[in-house]
């Protein structure tokens, strides 16, 4: 074998799913491939066309675009595309564009078919990927992060109080003011009306490089009568003006009033709200750098909240980035320790499993191991992997679970068969600890490794639980015990003293009960969806009425959004986010809505308790 083919074999052996192929197959595969160079900006596949090749990225990067050019994914070396048409799709649903100069390994359809027939796991892997990207397309199509360029520039102004200087000032005075205010531009006024702008680039080019006397008036080097934007102009318009005129600063004026400046940096930061950019950045970061990117996801969510984004929208951003963080940590571990000697799936549960993460969410996760797992042969690697990932998540900002429901706890590392046996014990003997575990682990979702293992364990657990009336009664009793904090005459019941005096816990008396109810309705209907809203929606007409489902979704949305805004304000003030809200700090409308939400929840809890009487326990 030539050195080049050997390098390709080693490259394939380091990436999914090829690393699972037999050695003989891996050695032969490079000979069936061609290496293709694609320059930056070139379209490799156009949406709607027929494709007969599997592409593996050797170097560079490729963007996956859906309908209306929505960015769904950015793929780095080792990842693949083109497979959807090789496993059943008649035509490509996505466009693929090289965003860097890219080298591709290309495998024709006939060779892919032979490979898939000889290795069924390979075909299943690509079928799963195709389903995942289709799901991502549906999820992100209407997400506000995709519409960030529709943001009004009035919400983006870099300097809330514009930095101004009179036209009679000298260059030195202007430069000193820019340094003192730590800004990259200063607006020049004449009788309080905008007459020019001076930027840091102007100082470098027109003053320093030109060796101009800095005692000259600022008007000698400023850009006179600069282009301006109105406050209702959109970020997209600002970006176009900057690109057309090769400038990086645009004053924002409301008639004669100067409001501030929007910069190209503001546009860049706005685009970083998009989870695709954040996850792509994570894929290039070292462990030490992950914290910065993960924290910027929190900043991005804060900006989304300021623009009126809902909990449903922001939680998707946080969860998408948290999932990517897990995958990156696993990649970093495997770079130093090699691939796992046994098949596994890293799963998330709790709020991350339900795709409902908020600013205060910690980590809850576990490992499903293949049934051929051997503690003596594989245990050390798996333990080190789990510890590396969980501790890496904590270092990046996702707190360790205080209840130790994490993969680094040996209790939550089990083979697939052991997981099914454990679920069966929880279902048939729902003691207090078992009930707690049932609530958490029925929200299981795979994020890395062999995802089919998680899908199969979860689906089998739901199927077994669907007919267990005893389990249903226990779960109904737990949900009904979550009393909303309402007293007589619809008054709020608040904490009397202590750290949270005069507040009520919206999670304990509200959203937690809704999550429990949704889980029960999904189990009764045999549904494998894990999101609270999706569970209510899909259970409608099966285990509860459409009207009840609509009401519960409305209550969940309201309480979640109220909590999100509360926690966002806490974080802005440098406080730790919590679920304790002082109802007296709410306006009259929100207090009324909060009472109504708790009333609806209590009514549904009573109905649930009636449908599942204690005698069934």
Image (cartoon, rainbow, N blue to C red):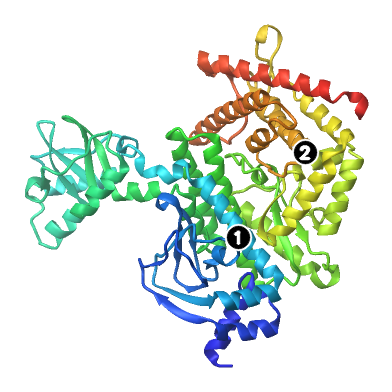
Q: Which residue corresponds to the image point at 42% horizontal and 62% vertical from the top-left?
A: 46
Using the rendered view, name the quadrant where residue 124 is placed: bottom right
Rendered view: 379 above or below 554: below
Point out the image quarter for the C terminus.
Answer: top right
Q: What label does residue 393 carry, if any? A: none
Using the rendered view, name the quadrant where residue 605 is placed: top right
Q: Is residue 338 visible?
A: no
The image position of residue 427, as x and y in percent, is 87, 42
Q: Which residue corresponds to the image point at 62% horizontal and 64% vertical from the top-left?
A: 126
Q: Nearer the viewer, residue 493 or 324?
A: 324
Tell me how far mark 1 sits from mark 2, CA to CA. 26 Å
Point out the image quarter for the N terminus.
Answer: bottom right
The image position of residue 431, as x and y in percent, is 90, 37
- Name the residue tied to disc 2: 523
Q: Which tag, 1 or 2, sits closer to the chain's start? A: 1
- Label 1 neighbour load within 10 Å: few <14, some 14-19, many 20+: some
- Label 2 neighbour load within 10 Å: few <14, some 14-19, many 20+: many
Residue farthest to the front, as pictured? 90
Disc 1 element: helix
Q: Which residue corresponds to the image point at 83% horizontal and 27% vertical from the top-left?
A: 477
The image position of residue 93, as x and y in percent, is 49, 57
- Name the residue tied to disc 1: 129
């Amino acid at each position: 074998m030539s050195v080049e083919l050997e390098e390709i074999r080693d490259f394939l052996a380091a990436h999914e799913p090829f690393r699972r192929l037999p050695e003989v197959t891996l050695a032969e595969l490079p000979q069936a491939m061609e290496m293709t160079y694609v320059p930056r900006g070139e379209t490799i596949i156009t949406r709607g066309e027929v494709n007969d090749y599997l592409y593996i990225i050797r170097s560079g990067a490729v963007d996956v675009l859906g309908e209306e050019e929505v960015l769904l994914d950015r793929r780095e070396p080792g990842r693949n595309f083109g497979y959807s048409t090789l496993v059943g799709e008649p035509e490509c649903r996505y466009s693929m564009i090289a965003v860097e100069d890219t080298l591709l390994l290309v495998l024709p359809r006939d060779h892919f078919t032979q490979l898939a027939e000889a290795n069924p796991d390979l075909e299943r892997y690509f079928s799963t990927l195709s389903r995942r990207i289709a799901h991502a397309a549906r999820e992100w199509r209407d997400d506000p992060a995709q519409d960030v360029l529709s943001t009004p520039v009035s919400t983006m102004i870099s300097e809330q109080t514009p930095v101004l200087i009179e036209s009679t000032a000298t260059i030195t005075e202007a430069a000193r003011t820019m340094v003192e205010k730590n800004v990259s531009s200063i607006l020049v006024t004449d009788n309080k009306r905008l007459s020019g702008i001076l930027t840091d680039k102007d100082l470098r080019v027109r003053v320093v490089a030109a060796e101009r006397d800095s005692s000259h008036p600022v008007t000698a080097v400023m850009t006179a009568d600069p282009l301006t934007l109105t406050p209702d102009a959109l970020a997209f318009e600002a970006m176009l003006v900057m690109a057309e005129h090769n400038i990086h600063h645009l004053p924002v004026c409301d008639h004669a009033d100067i409001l501030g400046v929007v910069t190209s940096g503001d546009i860049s930061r706005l685009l970083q709200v998009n989870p695709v950019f954040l996850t792509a950045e994570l894929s290039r970061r070292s462990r030490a750098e992950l914290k910065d990117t993960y924290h910027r996801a929190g900043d991005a969510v804060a900006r989304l909240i300021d623009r009126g984004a809902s909990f449903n929208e922001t939680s998707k951003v946080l969860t998408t980035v948290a999932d990517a963080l897990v995958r990156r940590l696993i990649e970093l571990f495997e770079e130093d320790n090699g691939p796992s000697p046994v098949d596994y799936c890293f799963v998330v549960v709790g709020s991350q499993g339900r795709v409902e993460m908020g600013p205060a969410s910690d980590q809850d996760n576990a490992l499903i191991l293949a049934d051929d797992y051997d503690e003596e042969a594989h245990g050390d690697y798996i333990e080190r992997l789990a510890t590396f990932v969980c501790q890496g998540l904590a270092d990046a900002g996702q707190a360790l679970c205080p209840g130790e429901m994490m993969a680094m706890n040996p209790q939550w590392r089990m083979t697939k068969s052991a997981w099914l046996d454990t679920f069966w014990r929880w279902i048939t003997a729902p003691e207090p600890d078992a009930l707690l575990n049932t609530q958490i682990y029925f929200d299981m979702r795979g994020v890395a490794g062999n995802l089919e293992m998680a899908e199969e364990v979860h689906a089998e657990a739901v199927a077994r639980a669907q007919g267990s009336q005893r389990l249903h009664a226990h779960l109904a009793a737990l949900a009904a015990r979550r009393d909303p904090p309402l007293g007589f005459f619809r008054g709020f019941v608040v904490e009397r003293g202590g750290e949270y005096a005069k507040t009520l816990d919206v999670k304990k008396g509200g959203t937690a009960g809704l999550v429990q109810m949704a889980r029960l309705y999904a189990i009764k209907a045999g549904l494998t969806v894990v999101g609270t809203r999706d569970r209510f929606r899909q259970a409608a007409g099966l285990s509860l009425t459409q009207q009840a489902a609509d009401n519960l979704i409305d209550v969940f949305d309201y309480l979640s959004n109220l909590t999100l805004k509360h926690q966002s304000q806490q974080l802005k003030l440098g406080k730790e986010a919590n679920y304790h809200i002082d109802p007296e700090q709410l306006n009259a409308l929100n207090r009324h809505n909060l009472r109504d939400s708790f009333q609806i929840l209590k009514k549904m809890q009573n109905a649930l308790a009636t449908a599942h009487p204690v005698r069934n326990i």
